[in-house]
Image: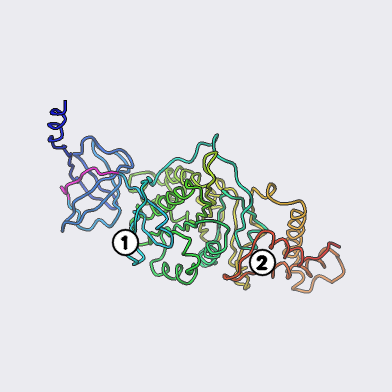
Amino acid sequence: MRKTAKEMQKISVITSYGRIRSVRGLSIDVAGLYPNPPIGGCIRIAAAGRVEIHAEVVSGRDGGVLAVGRRELDGLTVGARVEHVRRLVVQPCAAWLGRVVDPTGRPIDGRGSLSSGSVPRPLRAPPPEAGTRARLGPRVDLGVRALDAFATCRRGQRLGLFAASGVGKSSLMAMLARHADCDIAVIGLVGERGRELREFIEDDLGPEGLARSVVVCATSDQAPLMRRDAALAAMAVAEHFRDEGKRVLLMMDSVTRFAMALREIGLSAGEPPATRGFPPSVFAELPRLLERAGPGAEGCAGSITGLFTVLVEGDDHDEPVADAVRGILDGHVVLDRRIGEGGRYPAVDVLRSLSRTVPGCLEPAERLILARARRILALHRDMADMVRLGAYRAGSDPAVDEAVRLAPAIEAVLRQGKEEAGSVAGAFAALSLAMGPES
C-alpha cells in the first residue's frame, strides 16, 4: 500500500490550458479549457512581455467562456495561453488595521509588506440565514448629532447616505470613522479619484481614525472588476472581524459606483441594458452585497453596522440605483447641497432622513423631543419664504412664532465640526436645551 502511494505521488498533475479566441472591448473569449471554469471562476492569461493578466469568467459562449480582466488588456493577443486558477480570496487580520489595501489584499499605502491571517475569506459569501440571524443590538453613538438625534441607529443596522457629489460625504464618513462607537471601521472606496485617496486618509480621516480602520480602495481608472471587488473585499474584511466578535462599522463610498462597475461587466457579457442602461444582474447583485451587513448568526457577539453612500445625480432620488438601495436598507440619510451652501455642515436634511428602527431605540421623552423638533423645523421651512418677504406678521400664529424663534437654535445644534464628537444622549440633551419647555 505504501509503495502504491509513493508511486502515485510521482504522477504529474495534468493542467488544462486554453487559448484566447478573440478580445472585444472589455471581454475575452476563451476556448479549450477542460472542464470549462464556472461562472465566477478565475483564469490567468499569459500576455506579451511575460505579463500575466487575471480575469473572471462572466458567461459561457459557443463551447468556451467569456471573461473580464482585472486590469487593462494591453498586450493580449489572440491565441495567448489561458489556465484556470483558484478564486480570489483575502486573508485579513489585526495587522491590517491602519493600512490601505487593494481588492486583492495587496498594500498600496507605501508602508511595506502586510502579513495575512490564517483563514482565507472568499469575496463572495452568503449572509447568515435569516431564521437564525441575531436581532439588531442596542442603539449606537455615531458621533454626529444630526444622525444620533434624527436618524438614530442600532448596532447591526444599515443606513444609506444619499447625496450628489461635493456635498460633504467624505467629511461625514471621516467623522463617523473617528467618533462612532465601534471597535473597527472598514472603509471601502469604490472608484475613488486617485488624487483624493491621500487627502481623505491624511486630512479627513487623520491618524486617530486610520489607527482603527482598514481602507480598501480601487480608483476610478482601474478595471470594472477591481472596482466591483473593492466593495466585495471590504465586506469580506468586515465579516472577518464580525466573526471575531468585533463591533464593526462598515462605510462604503459608493454603492452607485459599484453598480456602474457591474453595469460595465454585465454589458460586456452581452446582457441587455434594461433600466436606464443598467442590466438586470445589477439589481440582483445589490441585495447580495447589502444583505451581508448586519448582525451575525445567533450567538455571535459581533455585528456590522453599515453606512452606504449613494450618488444621486442631479438630486434625482428616484433614479434606479437609489430607489433599489433605499428599499433594501433600514433607513436613509439625505445630504442637501442647499444646506451646505448655507454654511451648515454636516449638510444633513433631517426632515427627509429616516431610520426605520427609531421607534424601538428611543425613550418616551426622547420621542417627544424628536417629534417637537421635526414639527418646528417643518413649519419653519414651510413659512420661511413668507417670513423672508415680510408677508407674515409676528403674533398672527403662536406656532409659527415659536418656529421662527427656535429653528435657528436647532440648526445650531445640528452644526458640528469634524473634530467634535457627539452621542445620542448628548444630542437629545442639546435639542431639549435649545428648544426649552414647550409652551
Q: Is residue 255 left or right of residue 13?
A: right
Q: Name the quadrant of the C terminus.
A: bottom right
The residue positioned farthest toward the front in the image shown? 2
The quadrant where residue 407 appears: bottom right
Q: Name the quadrant of the N terminus.
A: top left
Tag 2 secondary structure: helix
Viewer-nearest of discs 1 and 2? 1
Q: Measured along the vertical axis of the image, is residue 85 above or below residue 412?
A: above
Q: Residues within 10 Å of mark 1 (few under 14, many from 20)?
A: few
Location of residue 408 in the rendering, given as x and y in whole percent from the top left corner? 73, 70
| Label placed on residue 414 | 2
Residue corresponding to mark 1:
113
Highlighted magenta segment, given as a residue range: 78-86
Asked whether residue 329 is drawn in magenta, I would say no
Location of residue 251 in the rendering, given as x and y in whole percent from the top left corner? 50, 56
Q: Earlier in the sequence, mark 1 or mark 2?
A: 1
Decide which of 112, 405 is in the foreground and name it: 112
Location of residue 342 in the rendering, given as x and y in whole percent from the top left corner? 63, 72
Q: Is residue 143 left or right of residue 270?
A: right
Q: CA distance from mark 1 to mark 2?
A: 42 Å
Q: Amino acid at mark 1?
A: Ser
Tag 1 secondary structure: loop
The quadrant where residue 47 appears: bottom left
Asked whether residue 79 is drawn in magenta, I would say yes
Decide which of 2, 54 is in the foreground and name it: 2
